[in-house]
Amino acid sequence: MPHYHEIQPLAFRLRDDKDVFTATVQTLSFPDPWKTALHAVQSKRSGRNPAESRLKIGVLNKALRALVPDLIAIAPNADKRDAQEWLIARRPIDVQALHWIVDAWVREEYADGDAKTLRSILESLKPNDLQWRPQTFDLGRWSTSHNGTAVMTRDEAFVLLPDFLADQIGRHDVVFELGSECLRFRRAPLRPGGQGAELVSWPPQQSRRGNQQWHYSVVITLTVQTVPFQPFPVIHCDLGLRRWVSRPVTYLPAGEETSVFLLTSAPWLDRLPRSTGFQIAPIRWERASAGNGAGRYVWGSNLASILNRLVPKERAFPDPATICANPVGALNLQGDSHAALVYRNGMRPEHAIDPGIMTKVRRTLFEQIADTLQPFVTVADPLPKCRPTGASRMTVNQNPFAHTGKVNTQPHGSLRRAIIAQSIGNQLAIEMYVQTDEVRDALMKATAELLDVTIDPAMSGGTIDHPITIETPELCITAGTRQLGALGAPLDIPTSGGSSHDRCREAIRKRIDEISRQIPPATGTAVAFIELQGKDGFRGAEDPKHALRMGFALRNRLTQCITVGKDDRLDYRAKNGVLDMVRQLGVGVRLPQPQSLQLDRLGLAGLWLINRQRASSPGRVQQALPVFVSIDSNNQQINVYAPGLSAWLPYPQALLELSKAAGNGKLDRFQRPRDSIHFILDTIRREFMGTGDTVLFVHAQNARRAWPWLTNHRITVDGIAFGEEPPQPISNWRGLRIIRVRDSQFHETPEWYAKNESETGFMQGVSKINDRVFASTYGKPLQFRQARHGGGLDELAWNPAIVEFTVAALQPGDDPQRWAAYAHALRQALSHYDGATVLPLPLHLAKLASEYAIALDPRDEIDDEE
């Protein structure tokens, strides 16, 4: 095996010798008179104060993304009264064309209102109210915050710097060579509110699988990022594949959208510029209304009616149904106008090309990008691997739940049973609610192998009411089966009566009531395996999984759903389902010993903020719910605390209590993340201050909206702050340490490859970014270890990302590198999983608690913040 001593992040720095680095662009604000007029009618419609009302400007922004080429950025909240720029463009775009789009949006948005009021509003929206302003930005001008972290002079640098660099890559004379393949890139607009720049290779690559050609492109994403305590920014360069639908679409999950990338030989509207870049429009499946035949594919986000008003018939904006019926024809590779439908997981048929780029290809392409950009940036320095020795070397105990096949179950079988009994007591009821004999038998086999007991499929006469009993010295197990029946059917969501959110909640409550009538309450610890159709088997909100989880929790049962598609390995799915149930039981963590930190005992804690917006919540209820998980290194017991729980509860009991509160419509929660900060502060002060040595793990992207101290420019070395108060020395919080975890969400940590003089590959370990910030990397996951290594773009690959540890707040005498190594080891401390998790164990367990905490009570709902 190759030995590597450093990793190379796919990142750049601005050149130090670049004295002048300016960009002049055009900016346009959403006119104040328009805000006043539209907020007045919106407040009348919603019954809210005009100052609190929000316009549905998202549809307008998506129309701009579909119709207007070469927009650098679209601000998502331009309707707010204090918002500044709305649009940023390279050159002024004709305001009359923009006014046409706004006019069509207003006509559609308020078509159901008073005709006289609508006419008055439209007359008040004057094209001349739209005024482009040239602005020049110095993209190389950065300052530093009080903690030494780079801070942008203007927020626009996060958009304009990647845009400038992307223009260099997207020039027509720039060609990248990968073996016999040549790639040229075109610009693609990001979603409204997105930061960075994206380029897509075009024309697409093709790969044959059997008798079918599959199409895909390489994607380059450039984003500007900062690192705590580092005085300069970095530009991340992420590489991936975008797969284009290459066979007629047979299924797109209802309620979900995918994108169509459009290249046109002429603009859709007169007075708009021609462009060599993509425009993007969403597409979705629209279910038929009652008695109205089959559903159909339409433009998403209510764009269809706006497009119909604007695009003349002779220009023929593509028809969604035609694209889905003949996606390769829509690509029109021999023509001059193209419509490329993005493949997303859940669509059918599945795409034959796997996502990801092989390591050697990634390195080759990154080095060519670096050559193209070298007048402006330099490649970021490699990150050296930390070399812990002696007491600082971190290891985890052997995994007693690994290798759960027939071979080598002893002596692990009795050990596993003993570990389970230690966590839950000596009684465990296992119930299987199935729809097929094959799934029933697979679950029985997987359970028997894990616990090293005999559950003969011939004994399947054991039912929920009359279960089989298996006595072992460590654990008494009862097992029974039952046909799931109508409990597993799609939710029956009414087509009328109340809002769509109310109808969804009504359907969930109805299924919970059906479960209560059919399933008696369980005594002791009980787990229910439930066989469901795969996600593809349900249309949008009709998936009953969350209703089943709440309903079974009210009957005192943990649940593990097993979904099997026709191409799935049933034995593999069943084994993983049984192992995940072990996790729900709070069983068998494998902690590294605290002696490596020169401590006799250590409390581990994780904070995860369950943050659901109304549209994405199964119960269509907005919620923010902070969940703490704690683990004692001595007894390895897992406990949970959250709003509404009167005390710390063992992990399985806490999951049930959270789900019971949700099912009863009584889940204690906050409406916005920032509202939870006092609960977080009180819990940390009460539970972790002066109670012994404790390390608290917090996830940056998850919790910083509630706890601003977690942002890069506010976090402090060996200090802690809440709200707007100044930081306090962490030594005032006796025994407490805090490690902030950041992953690749929003491209905030870079992709990477390990390298030495002659080879490129992967490296497991901790690398140093600066004295308090470290990069945690693991080797290739098991499912990618059999990938071919010929170097082709279409080969199964893995896009690796760094998990970043900011070892922020330590007690006097602590060694930051040892604590980073300890956090790294905690990524491989889960008992039921041999590989590394993205998050250290306490955070991983806290995040998964969100499966059980789904609010149903709407209370006084507020508008989504995003």
Image (tube, rainbow, N blue to C red):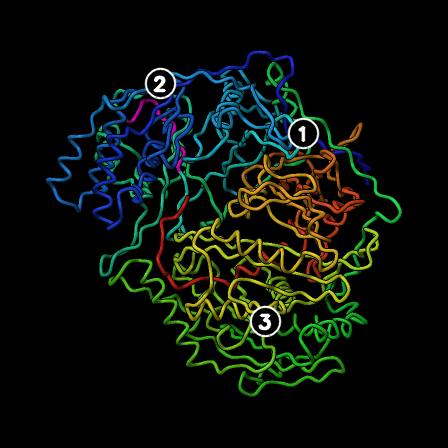
354 with respect to 137 (left or right): right
421 with respect to 758 (left or right): left
Q: Which quarter of the figure has residue 460? A: bottom right
Mark 2, residues whose alpha carbon is within 10 Å: few (<14), some, or many (≥20)?
A: some
Residue at image x 71%, y 39%?
774
Q: For the magenta stretch, what is the residue range?
A: 260-268
- Answer yes or no: is residue 179 visible: no
**Mark sitting earlier along the chain (1/3):** 1
Mark 3, residues whose alpha carbon is within 10 Å: few (<14), some, or many (≥20)?
A: many
Q: Secondary structure at mark 2?
A: strand
Instruction: Give the CA separation, mark 1 to mark 2.
Output: 41 Å
Q: Which mark is residue 657?
A: none
Amino acid at dot 1: Arg
**Viewer-nearest residue: 702 or 311:** 702
Residue at image x 11%, y 41%?
115
Amino acid at dot 3: Gln
Name above or below for residue 35 compared with residue 401.
Answer: above
Tell me the residue that label 3 is attached to: 653
Amino acid at dot 2: Arg
Mark 1, residues whose alpha carbon is within 10 Å: few (<14), some, or many (≥20)?
A: many
Residue at image x 55%, y 79%?
481
Q: Which quarter of the figure has residue 501? A: bottom left
In the picture, the quarter occupied by the C terminus is top left
- Residue furthest bottom as drawn: 466
Tell me the residue that label 1 is attached to: 363
548 with respect to 757 (left or right): left
Q: Which quarter of the figure has residue 793? A: top right
